Image (spheres, rainbow, N blue to C red):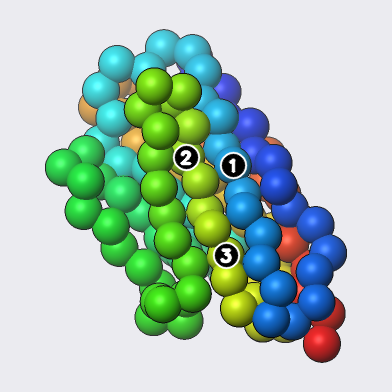
Amino acid sequence: QVRLVESGGGLVQAGGSLRLSCAASGNIFSIVAMGWYRQAPGKQRELVASIISGGSRNYADSVKGRFTISRDNTKNTMYLQMNSLKPEDTAVYYCNLQTSHFPYNSWGQGTQVTVSS
């Protein structure tokens, strides 16, 4: 079993910054990719940023240059540094972990990010 716990969400003014954390625990032996997704009210969940096992990073066009994804392998923790936040970044942010073994795809419970204009 894999457990993912997000933290760091909150309310911030436009132009501000937040750093999200995702702590992973459990039976994690072979990570394929880790990533952050978000879902705004009435919209589908979308990929924000991801890191694959080789270290390559991928970002949604809407966050390139503003968000940075990183990992601390010693702590099994992933981060999302979000700068220059915009009201359209308001959403519930979810941590995702893909492994080459069961359970293959795991999600955190989500953390709310609200950006006021």
Residue positioned 80% across, 69% down in the render: 12
**Cα distance, mark 2 to mark 1?**
6 Å
Q: Position of residue 109 (x, y in %)?
A: 68, 39
Badge 1 marks a residue whose secondary structure is: strand
Quick one: label 2, few (<14), some, or many (20+) residues within 10 Å?
many
Residue positioned 48% across, 32% down in the render: 77
**Cα distance, mark 3 to mark 2?**
13 Å
Question: Circles 1 and 3: CB distance less than 8 Å?
Answer: no
Sooner in the amino-acid sequence: mark 1 or mark 3: 1
Sooner in the amino-acid sequence: mark 2 or mark 1: 1
The dot on residue 21 is 1
Question: Circles 2 and 1: CB distance less than 8 Å?
Answer: yes
Q: Is residue 113 above or below residue 66?
A: above
User: Relative to the observer, which residue lies in front, 110 or 73?
Assistant: 73
Residue positioned 51% across, 46% down in the render: 79
Quick one: label 3, few (<14), some, or many (20+) residues within 10 Å?
many
Q: Amino acid at mark 2?
A: Met
Quick one: label 1, few (<14), some, or many (20+) residues within 10 Å?
many
State which quadrant residue 71 falls in: top left
Q: Position of residue 68 (x, y in %)?
A: 44, 61
Q: Amino acid at mark 1?
A: Ser
The C terminus: image quadrant: bottom right
Q: Amino acid at mark 3?
A: Met
- Residue beneath label 2, please? 78
- Residue beneath label 3, please? 82
The dot on residue 33 is none
Badge 3 marks a residue whose secondary structure is: strand
Q: Is residue 65 above or below residue 25?
A: below
